[in-house]
Every structure is written in structure tokens, then in C-alpha cells.
Image (cartoon, rainbow, N blue to C red):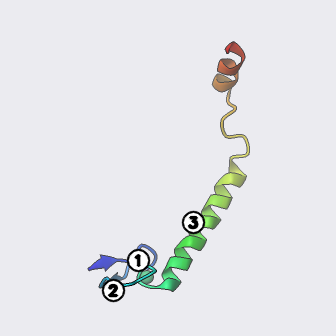
Amino acid sequence: MNKCPACNKRFDKIKNNDSFPFCSERCRLIDLGDWLTENHKISEENIEPMLDETDIGNFTKH
Ligand SMILES: [Zn+2]
């Protein structure tokens, strides 16, 4: 038995299941959509991700 990461439903692995590890193509797309949304959100929130004072200090030293 496998557990679908999108809907947490338990399902039997079917041969030639293109959606594995998801139970269905629908769940695969849902999860992909969530991931893209989340990724987009993160990139918007972290507009200045690495340029804290420490990094700037190291950069000028080199
Ligand atoms: Zn599912």
C-alpha cells in the first residue's frame, strides 16, 4: 500500500501509474500546483535573501 502525498489516501500501486507516487493524475497536478504556488510565494517574500551584513562583509574582504 502507498499513501498519496496529496490527499493522504491509501492506494495500491498500479503498474504503469504515471502519477505515482500520487494516487491519480489529479492528485499529482494538485500537488504540483501547491508546490508552484508555494515556490512563487517564497520567491516573492525573499526578495533580498542572502545580502545580510555578514555576507556583505565577506564580499568586501575578498
Ligand atoms: Zn490522491
Q: Relative to 28, is 21 on the left or the right? A: left
Q: Secondary structure at mark 3?
A: helix
The residue to which callout 2 is attached is 14
- Callout 1 amino acid: Phe
Residue occupying image coordinates x 67% and y 60%: 40
The residue to which callout 1 is attached is 20
Residue 11's tag is none
User: Which of these two is toward me, 61 or 53?
Assistant: 61
- Earlier residue among tags 3 and 1: 1
Q: Quadrant of the C terminus?
A: top right
Q: In which quadrant of this rendering is ligand 1 seen?
A: bottom left
Residue occupying image coordinates x 62% and y 59%: 39
The CA distance from mark 3 to mark 1 is 16 Å
- Earlier residue among tags 2 and 1: 2
How packed mark 1 is, by other alpha carbons closer than 10 Å (few <14, some 14-19, many 20 or more), is some
Residue occupying image coordinates x 45% and y 85%: 24
Q: Secondary structure at mark 2?
A: loop
- Callout 3 amino acid: Trp
The residue to which callout 3 is attached is 35
Indicate which label's residue lies in the foreground, 2 or 3. Answer: 2
Q: Position of residue 55 (x, y in %)?
A: 65, 25
Residue 18 sits in which quadrant? Answer: bottom left
Q: Secondary structure at mark 1?
A: loop
Residue 57 sits in which quadrant? Answer: top right
Q: Are marks 2 and 1 in contact (CB under 8 Å)?
A: yes
Q: Are marks 2 and 3 in contact (CB under 8 Å)?
A: no
In the image, is the residue at mark 1 within 8 Å of ligand 1 by its beta carbon?
A: no
- Callout 2 amino acid: Ile
